[in-house]
Image (cartoon, rainbow, N blue to C red):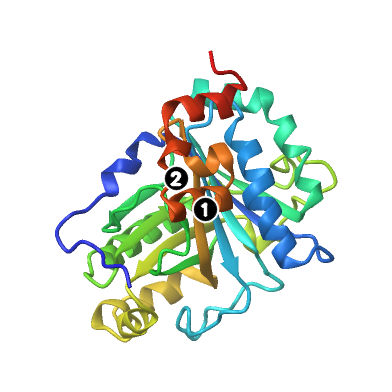
Amino acid sequence: MPKASTTTDYAQRDASIVINSYTTVLRRPRVPHEVFATYWRDVHGPLCSRIPGLGWYVQNHLDREQDAHLWPAIDGIAPFADYELDGGVEIGFASKADQDVFNAASHILFADEQNMFAATVAYALPSGSRTLVDRIADPIPNGDDGFDRIHVHFGAATDDADAFGGFMTEFARTLAADPAVLKLRLHLPDRYDNAEPAPPAPNVDHLVPTERALIAVIELAFETPLTRRAFFESDTFVGTQAAQKANIAHVQAYAVSGVYTYVRDKQLTTAGLRGSRQAQLIERLGANNQVADDVRHLMHTGSTE
């Protein structure tokens, strides 16, 4: 079982992601989950990784079968209706100029979405996301690292985006201050506009109901599910429930089955260059020649020169 650091906080390493997006994904209903996950990881992932301008690309795969008390039921806060997801994606940039370069070439990527996705919704984070705490050392996870990870989606109780954002920020700070929380990353996207569906992928649904237009997403990691359950019973969490009821109308939690990192700090990871499962094989066999500069150059350019 992996252990997190009790003294080192790696949150600052995410500060280079100046502009971000959080995209929810739902697989096509007649694509088996294993086929979907393999294609997303090893076909779509490396394709996206090579789009110029990209500074940050992470796939979070979600587990529909795990619902072991992921988030406490609170009177007055309802689940989102008909809100199944198979993943959440972060695509980020070091600058607006980099984002513009990516957008100009992204039609190559979006044309691929129809092969596996029934619906994708890209929530824009023009001021980036915030990592409030991160005591997990590995900056480029590629799989299930053994930590108990969840993504929690919140829908605003009112139409006041500023008030909702202010509450969610303070709520996240309160949670992040507890030592049981190993990682907390907060996404406060702009209100989604169905009149401008995003991403512009053909033959994929990009529309949301009203209650999912103004949302927040919190990524949490704990050492184990037992640690998570104990945290929900703690004075820290229980003390937030009245404020949650006043500011949150809907909530849905999703278990993370794996985190796959393809680009960080504008650099391709081995997963981004070769595919996620291929990168796992290289690591498992200790095939260090496969991560040497000459092989990486060959695989990236098709040339030994």
Q: Residue at x 70, y 36 (%)?
A: 109
The amino acid pointed to by label 1 is Leu
**Which of 216 and 67 lies nearest the eye of the viewer?**
67
- Side of 235 where 282 appears, left or right: right
**Which of 63 and 273 lies nearest the eye of the viewer?**
273
**Answer yes or no: do the residues labelled 1 and 2 have beta carbons within 8 Å?**
yes
Q: Position of residue 256 (x, y in %)?
A: 51, 67
- Side of 282 where 170 appears, left or right: left
Question: Does the rendering let one see residue 227?
Answer: yes
Sequence-earlier tag: 1 or 2: 1
Q: Position of residue 267 (x, y in %)?
A: 45, 32
Label 1: element kind? helix
Q: Residue at x 42, y 56 (%)?
A: 163
The residue wearing badge 2 is 287
Q: Residue at x 55, y 27 (%)?
A: 99
Q: Nearer the viewer, mark 1 or mark 2?
A: 2
The residue wearing badge 1 is 281
**Which of 211 and 229 lies nearest the eye of the viewer?**
229
Indicate the quadrant where residue 30 lies: bottom right
Total marks shown come to 2
The amino acid pointed to by label 2 is Ala
